[in-house]
Image: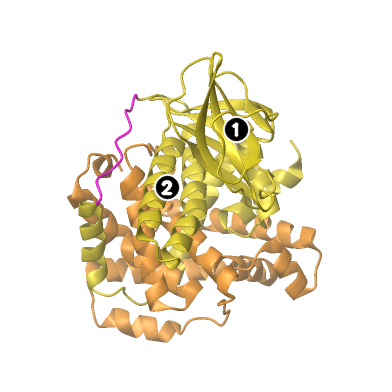
Amino acid sequence: MATGTHELTAGYALDALDSEERRTYEAHLPDCVRCQDELTSFWETADALAIAASGPEPSAGLRGRILADARAEPQVVVPFEPRRRRTVPVLSAVAAVAAVAALGVGLWASQVAGDLDDARAALERERQTAAVLADSTARTVPLEAGEGRLVVGQDGRAVLVLNGLDPAPPGKTYEMWIFEGDEMLPSGLFAGEDGVDIERVDGTVTPGDVVAVTLENEGGVEVSKNEPIVASTPV
Amino acid sequence: MALVARGDEGALGELYDRTGRIAYGLAVRVLRDDRLAEDAVQEAFLAVWRSAAGFRAERAKASTWILTLVHRRAVDLVRREERRRTEPLDEEAARLQDASEPTDEAVWLRFERERVQAALKQLPDVQREAIELAYYGGFSQSQLAERLGVPLGTIKSRMFAGLARLREILDEASKEGSWRPELTS
């Protein structure tokens, strides 16, 4: 492994990498136990830096608001089977932080647009996506075409994490598909953005299925004749 | 974390009591805005609440996750809004505020803060500068390279060496028994 990438661990732990390098590092991390260990311990050092920053107290109402919000919003319950895989916690944390950070922006944008239904839908997607990515029992399925990975939970919910896909051109959209034998099920649209795309695949993925992405005209199609840009290996 | 995953609001409250003030202090330090800071903290706690059932952390702890989320969000916001400022906080004001509420928690926090600040002062200036501008100022490594007029590779090395050294200093103190690993328990 290149020393250069390992050295990025400090920048990653301090959120100081530029988006390109952040992506490089996150792609490197699953395969590098040394970086995982280093990141875990650097995050603890970052905790100390957070303590050193502490000063004024939050307003007295903040605790109550958090608890009230939590009460109004039931947790996503992901079936859990204990596993002793040493690499999982830090990767789960990285995936969850990335998911919340990336998807939170989409949520914020739709709230600004004033469309409450959009905001609710975005929130629901964010919640489901975060749950799949943070599920330590989820499997990572490599891609045959395209750069990134497919994360599949035990319950068949799936999330596509794509690196370096350009935003869809004007008038176009990306469409996700689940290939189930000969069937091709439309599984959601997304516009694509610079950096990492994290997309929840609509529907349920079962063993042997392939998840793919095509470029379609705005609005999407029921059946595509286009060649997939992204395709997973069979789940 | 296991308690939060069980849907126990009491556990979420406990997590807040342990981490909320530190998270807020961090967010204020980066964002310099009370309201944005509270939003960032609220968002992080709810994110943990939402996906706690799936987040099984043996080593990356709930409090670390909260602080990481708060920091990531705060840095994203300052980079977007160019809200970043780099002057040090008025530490005296924070100290005075502590003095007015001498709870165990406040005493512990003040003790730890001073200990970590002392550890930071032991770092070579250029390493401390790289760490503080990145973590508290929200500067990326390439922004720092430009701002300080040094090669990007130099910034990366300084940050890595500085953080590794800081970890070492804090670990040494921990062996001497003064480090209460409260946050990571």
Q: Residue at x 24, y 46 (%)?
A: A74
Q: Is residue A54 magenta?
A: no
Element at label 2: helix
Q: Quadrant of the N terminus of chain A?
A: top right
* Residue A149 in which image quadrant: top right
Residue drawn 39% across the image and 39% down it: A131
Residue A20 position within the rendered picture, expressed as x and y whole percent measured from the top left = 70, 52
Write down the chain letter for disc 1: A
Task: Kindly state the secondary structure of the residue where label 1 is placed.
Answer: strand
Quadrant of the rendered structure where residue B92 is?
bottom left
Q: Residue at x 35, y 60 (%)?
A: A116
Disc 1 crowd, CA 10 A, few/some/many (<14, 14-19, 20+): many
Q: Which residues are magenta?
A: A73-81
Amino acid under disc 2: Glu
Give coordinates of residue B73: x percent, y percent.
Answer: 49, 61
Residue B19 in sight: yes
Indicate the amino acid at tag 1.
Answer: Arg
Question: What is the crowding at mark 2: few (fewer than 14 residues within 10 Å), some, or many (at least 20)?
Answer: many
Residue B171 in sight: no
User: Which residue has dot 1 on it?
Assistant: A149
Viewer-proximal residue among B175 and B21: B21
Give the colour chain A carries in the figure: yellow
Q: Main secondary structure of the magenta part?
A: loop
